[in-house]
Image: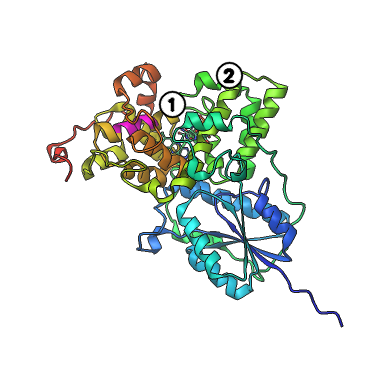
Amino acid sequence: MALDPVKKIGLFWFTNDLRIDDNPALHQAADEVDTLICLYCIRPKSTFSDQQAPSKLSPNRQQFLFDSLIDLEKSLAEKGQQLLVEFKSPADAIPELITQYNISHIYRSNNASEYKRKIWDTLNKRYSMIQFNQIDSHTLFDKSQLPFTLDKLPDSFSKFRRMVSDIAVRAPLGKPPQLPISSLTTKQDWQTVWKGIWKAEPLHKQLSEDQLFKGGSQAGKQHLQNYFNSKSASSYKETRNGLDGLSYSTKFSPWLSNGSISARQIISELQKYETEAEANESTYWIYFELLWREYFQWYAHNHRAKLFKFNGIKNSNPTTSFYPERFQKWCQGNTPYPIVNACMKQLNATGYMSNRGRQLVASCFVHELNLDWRYGAAYMEQQLIDYDVASNWGNWQYLAGVGADPRGHRRFDLGKQTQIYDPERLFIKRWGGDQHLEKLDSRDTVDWPI
Ligand SMILES: Cc1cc2nc3c(=O)[nH]c(=O)nc-3n(C[C@H](O)[C@H](O)[C@H](O)COP(=O)(O)OP(=O)(O)OC[C@H]3O[C@@H](n4cnc5c(N)ncnc54)[C@H](O)[C@@H]3O)c2cc1C
């Protein structure tokens, strides 16, 4: 009598790859296992008190992620699968599932989160009988395509760009033709649990259409189509430093950051636009900016925990300190600088801020308010719907002079910047940047370092 072959039971750990299109690790799982559990973990800070809990999510971030997960669940359901959302750390959830379901294969998309890498490595060591598989898909290139080993990552973006400029971006994959059936026997009502934890109404209900971002792959792909159909790509280089509105820059970042769309999908659409509509300096510049993102991704992979250190990748500490009141004023948009206030109010209301705005508020944080850059980065982590660990902390380091900036000291003249980018102060007025201007009071101006 023939023996039953041993069943292969897979676990797919979704992180910032919330899509089934162009998800090579999911394709691999689909090819290899008989049944599969699709898992997403989120551990709300409010339910834990230890340091490793993820930061608080602003209502905008909550809503964007919630919509993204609903969309992922729908895509999985179309392939006969389901999404398991666990409200706990993956370090707890995955071992429980391994025991309960006798998991033999685990998959994930590789990403730059140090927290998740550590969990992955620990599990890998602990369960030697399980096959662990991870594939790069948050980046344009696979690690194997890079013309250097990670520890030899160029120390500046310009060098990096020159070295990778000839590498072809692989074409995106479609959806896996089919997915293995789920190992789960019951369907979980994670949406009710979610709503019980995060009771706050999203602020975005008060916003107009041009300020809204809707999470999920479907909305992301629709936005990608709309952007290229609008022909805004042809003038991107001239408009990209705008502060307000939908079309001055691509606004791909929210969907890119949680992986509802992939960077390769964007490049594929960009190349199509260049072939069918127009290729010019602006279209090149979209690729150029995506290379910045690429640089910060590999930078984070390389520097790991140094991404969060006060002195970053340098040898000496910045000459800043921490002043709680200044920090509060910056967060709320009540500093003496109207352009900074407008940007911060825009961020708090919408979960988004322009690239120019981010540079100005970060420069103000470090150079005018003399604050420890890590608190600014942590606040953005909490607020930004496009929060990406590598781009956020890498850019903050750069502006704080402890990262990949060869010049090392980038201070923006806020008055001049206002004249250039908001000459009629329309942006400042729209967001109330000149209301509640507050001086830094005397208690704030203690000498550093305290
Ligand atoms: C202090 C600071 C914090 C930042 N935090 C984040 C973050 O958490 N998440 C995030 O995605 N981006 C971050 N950025 C980079 C940049 O501001 C945003 O990617 C950009 O504003 C997103 O809007 P967009 O998609 O319209 O960009 P576009 O101008 O249309 O650029 C196209 C794409 O290129 C990439 N890109 C552009 N500029 C940068 C850059 N400087 N660094 C890395 N990638 C870039 C993004 O993926 C972006 O979607 C930060 C920048 C600064 C200065």
Image mark for residue 281: 2
Q: How is the image coloured?
A: rainbow
Residue 29, quarter of picture: bottom right
Query: Is 417 colored magenta in this rendering?
Result: no
Q: Earlier in the sequence, mark 1 or mark 2?
A: 1
Position of residue 109 measured from the top left corner of the image (x, y, whole percent)? 59, 52
Which quadrant, please, contains the N terminus?
bottom right
Residue 432 visible to an observer of this rendering:
no
Query: Is 363 colored magenta in this rendering?
Result: yes
Instruction: Tell me if mark 2 has few (under 14), some (14-19) or many (20+) residues whose alpha carbon lies within 10 angstroms of its own.
Output: some
Find numbered disc 2 in the image and state the secondary structure of the residue it sits on: helix
Residue 374, quarter of picture: top left
Q: Which residues are magenta?
A: 359-364
Towards the viewer: 19 or 403: 403
Up-down relation of residue 58 to residue 404 (above or below): below
Does the numbered disc 1 mark a residue whose Cβ is under 8 Å from ligand 1? Answer: no
Residue 221 visible to an observer of this rendering:
yes
The CA span between labels 1 and 2 is 21 Å
Q: Does the magenta stretch mainly form a helix, a strand or a loop?
A: helix
Towards the viewer: 74 or 101: 101
Find numbered disc 1 in the image and state the secondary structure of the residue it sits on: loop
Instruction: Tell me if mark 1 has few (under 14), some (14-19) or many (20+) residues whose alpha carbon lies within 10 angstroms of its own.
Output: many
Image mark for residue 309: none
In the image, taking residue 169 as reference, residue 431 lies left or right, namely left
Position of residue 12 measured from the top left corner of the image (x, y, whole percent)? 62, 60
Position of residue 294 measured from the top left corner of the image (x, y, whole percent)? 53, 38
The amino acid beneath tag 2 is Glu
Residue 399, quarter of picture: top left
Q: Nearer the viewer, mark 1 or mark 2?
A: 2
In the image, taking residue 25 as reference, residue 237 lies left or right, namely left
The amino acid beneath tag 1 is Leu
Name the residue that disc number 1 marks.
243
